[in-house]
């Protein structure tokens, strides 16, 4: 299944206050910066993440009483990444959780 573009939710705060912020552990900002993504162009990152979700297969990873967790692999500027999405039981939207380099 592919996630329809009108069902995708990516919070601005998730990008600006999580992915694009340097962290001691599980830092994602380093490789995103190398790919050209910064707080100055976070909207471009949002578009690219949305395209990954809508153009690639979403694979169900886990179902809980609260909803379903999906993994979608794709590329950012030619670099393989894995994106994680959550669809709540009572909401037909897919909420972006995180991304990380695809090491597989």
Image: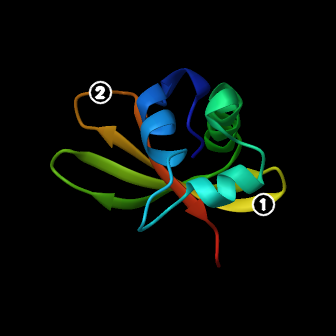
Q: Position of residue 63 (x, y in %)?
A: 28, 56
SS state under label 2: loop
Q: Is residue 70 left or right of residue 99?
A: left
Of discs 1 and 2, which sits in the foreground? 1
Residue lying farthest to the right in this orientation? 78
Give percent across and percent down for residue 94: 43, 35
Residue wearing tag 1: 79
According to the picture, the residue beneath numbered tag 2 turns out to be 91
C-alpha distance separating marks 1 and 2: 31 Å
Residue 11 in sight in this render: no
Which mark sits nearer the N-terminus, 1 or 2?
1
Residue at 51%, 47% in the rendered image = 19
At label 1, counting other C-alpha atoms closer than 10 Å, the crowd grade (few under 14, some 14-19, many 20 or more) is: few
Check whether the beta carbons of the residues at disc 1 and disc 2 lie within 8 A of each other.
no
Q: Is residue 102 left or right of residue 78?
A: left
Quarter placement of the C terminus: bottom right
In the rendered structure, find residue 45 and report the number of the disc placed on it: none
Residue found at x 51% / y 37%: 15
Q: Residue furthest bottom?
A: 104
Q: At 64% from the left edge and 76% from the top edge, which residue is drawn?
A: 103
Q: Secondary structure at mark 1?
A: strand
Q: Position of residue 55 (x, y in %)?
A: 71, 41
Measuring 40% from the left and 28% from the top, which residue is drawn there?
93
């Amino acid at each position: 299944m592919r996630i329809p573009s009108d069902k995708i939710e990516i919070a601005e705060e998730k990008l600006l206050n999580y992915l694009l912020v340097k962290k001691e552990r599980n830092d994602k900002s380093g490789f995103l910066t190398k790919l050209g993504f910064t707080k100055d162009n976070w909207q471009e990152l949002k578009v690219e993440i949305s395209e990954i979700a809508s153009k690639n297969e979403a694979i169900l990873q886990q179902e809980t009483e609260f909803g379903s967790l999906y993994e979608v692999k794709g590329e950012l500027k030619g670099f393989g990444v894995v994106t994680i999405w959550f669809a709540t039981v009572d909401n037909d939207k897919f909420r972006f959780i995180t991304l990380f380099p695809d090491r597989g």
